[in-house]
Image (cartoon, grey):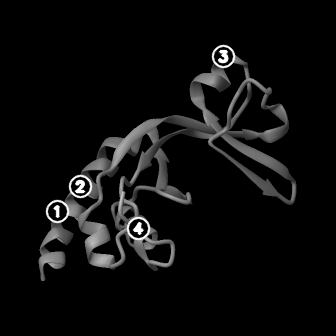
Amino acid sequence: MTEILDFDSALAALEPATCGVYVYCNGADVPPEVTPFAIINESEGPCALIPAEDAKRHNISYSHEPLTRISLGVSSAVYLHGLTGAVAQNLAAAQIPCNVISGMRHDHLFVTKRHSREAMSHLRRLAKQAQGWARG
């Protein structure tokens, strides 16, 4: 996949896709057979973002409500400023809370499960709108 270097083209190329349901839990509670999506080392100790199915299967307690992972489906250059901010701001304007985790190749949003369909609709609309900007 070729990296996209300009902001408008990156927004226009969004291909959001849902990729499962996850929960935050205490990282120390995660058994070796569970592979976290992310581990965040906080001052209070590590927290992990794991598939909700694994939390249920292993009786792992978690905080907050389950979150749907949405991959933005675009490979943008790591130095392309503002893409995740613009996406998060678009969702925030619609009262859809989200957490963003950026990987080396893709960006991922975590939205409450009850907001996932609405979030997908907003992201598709944003991409369609940006396609007009990219043609400029």
Q: As shown in the figure, which amino acid type bears the numbered disc 1? A: Lys
Q: Amino acid at mark 4?
A: Ser
- The total number of labels drawn is 4
Q: How far apart are labels 1 and 3 at the CA level?
A: 39 Å
Residue beneath label 1, please?
128
Q: Nearer the viewer, residue 9 or 82?
A: 9
| Front tag of 4 and 3 | 4
The Cα–Cα distance between marks 2 and 4, rounded to whole angstroms, is 17 Å
Mark 4: few/some/many CA within 10 Å (<14, 14-19, 20+): many
Splitting the image into 4 quarters, where does residue 6 fall? bottom left
Q: Is residue 17 above or below residue 97?
A: above
C-beta proximity under 8 Å, tags 1 and 4: no
First-in-chain label (2 vs 3):
3
Residue neighbourhood size for the residue with mark 1, other residues' Cα within 10 Å, grouped as few (<14), some (14–19), many (≥20): some
Q: Is residue 31 left or right of residue 10?
A: right
Q: Which mark is residue 124?
A: 2
State which tag comes first along the sequence, 2 or 4: 4
Q: Is residue 43 left or right of residue 109?
A: right
Q: Position of residue 125 (x, y in %)?
A: 20, 59
Local packing at callout 3 (Cα closer than 10 Å; few below 14, some 14-19, many 20+) is few
> Which tag, 1 or 4, sits closer to the chain's start?
4
Pair 1/4: label in front: 4
